[in-house]
Image (cartoon, rainbow, N blue to C red):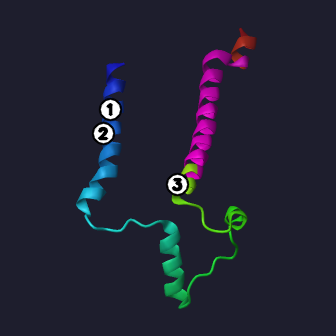
């Protein structure tokens, strides 16, 4: 059990380092999203400014762009729901293996 705790702590420290090192190593760098990079690449390749094919439904309803905080909230909710589904599936598989037993071995005994 102590070995697993050490591995977990090491992985947490590694995740923190991966997150924090770029912030300090690349001072003054701009960290943009993939949407901005994609738009710039399309403009570079085609020579024209990128125009989206449609406007998001919620932006049409509100009459403008969503505030950054709301976008972050939706992203976090989407992530939480996805993690919940994946965690449930893993838990189900582990419980089935642990408590369900293999039906074929029970019948042959």
Q: Are marks 1 and 3 in contact (CB under 8 Å)?
A: no
Q: Residue at x 56, y 86 (%)?
A: 49
Which residue is disc 3 drawn over? 69
The span shown in magenta is 74-103
Q: Residue at x 32, y 32 (%)?
A: 9
Q: Is residue 44 left or right of residue 12?
A: right
Examine the image and state in which quarter residue 16 appears.
top left
In the picture as drawn, the residue positioned furthest to the right comes out as 107
For this view, does 41 lie left or right of residue 92? left
> Does the magenta segment cover residue 91?
yes
Q: Secondary structure at mark 2?
A: helix
Residue that label 1 marks = 9
In contact (CB < 8 Å): disc 1 and disc 2: yes
User: Residue 62 location, x and y as percent?
Assistant: 68, 63
Question: Residue 13, which numbered label?
Answer: 2
Q: Residue at x 61, y 48 (%)?
A: 78
Residue 93 seen in render? yes
Quarter occupied by residue 5: top left
Q: Determine the CA span between mark 1 and mark 3.
A: 31 Å
| Closer mark to the observer between disc 2 and disc 3 | 3
């Amino acid at each position: 059990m102590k070995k697993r705790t050490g591995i977990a702590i090491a992985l947490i420290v590694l995740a923190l380092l991966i997150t924090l090192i770029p912030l300090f190593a690349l001072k003054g760098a701009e960290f943009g999203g993939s949407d901005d990079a994609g738009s710039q690449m399309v403009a570079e390749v085609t020579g024209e400014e990128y125009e989206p094919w449609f406007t998001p439904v919620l932006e049409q309803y509100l009459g403008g762009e969503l505030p950054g905080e709301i976008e972050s909230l939706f992203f976090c909710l989407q992530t939480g729901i996805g993690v919940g589904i994946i965690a449930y599936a893993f838990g189900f598989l582990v419980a089935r293996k642990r408590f369900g037993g293999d039906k074929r071995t029970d019948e042959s005994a």
